[in-house]
Image (spheres, rainbow, N blue to C red):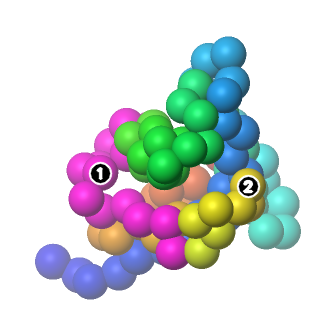
Amino acid sequence: MQDFSCDLTVRLTPRADREAVVFEAGPPPLIRARVVAPPVGGQANAALIKLLAKRLRVPKSRLRVVRGETARDKVVRVDGLTAADAHARLGS
């Protein structure tokens, strides 16, 4: 198995009415994610990881927030996927 990963730029909106992921192509590609969870105690980050794992069809253990833990704009690292594969799975 090859050892590779990609970083996804995500703009997170907590306390949304419903959960959704929208991919916006462009330099840099941006993923807008909406989660129902509040931004308290890492709940929104956990919901983001769960939502992205489901959309990317990878285990939650392969995703982690590497930058922006408490910010709205985040960088999420996905182990085992190339950027092209991740963008294709998100519907780019």
Residue 60's mark? 1
- Residue type indicated by callout 2: Arg
Residue 54: give x, y in percent of width and height. 37, 37
Front-lying residue, 38 or 16: 38
Instruction: Determine whether, in the image, residue 39 is placed left or right of residue 42.
Output: right
Check disc 1: other Cα within 10 Å, few if <14, some if 14-19, many if 20+.
Answer: some
Q: Earlier in the sequence, mark 1 or mark 2?
A: 1
Residue at 25%, 59% in the rendered image: 61
Indicate whether residue 9 is drawn in magenta: no
- What amino acid type is highlighted by mark number 1? Lys
Residue lying at 35% horizontally and 81% vertically, measured from the top left:
4
Residue 69: numbered disc: none
Q: CA distance from mark 1 to mark 2?
A: 20 Å
Q: Position of residue 66 (x, y in %)?
A: 51, 75
Disc 2: which residue: 72
| Label 2: few (<14), some (14–19) or many (≥20) C-alpha neighbours in 10 Å | few
Does 54 lie within the magenta span? yes
- The structure residue drawn at horizontal position 83% and vertical position 60%, both measured from the top left corner, is 26
Q: Is residue 52 visible?
A: no
Q: Is residue 3 above or below residue 90?
A: below
Residue 10 higher or lower than 24, as above or below: below
Residue 49 percent across, percent down from the top left: 43, 49
Observer-nearest of 12 and 79: 12
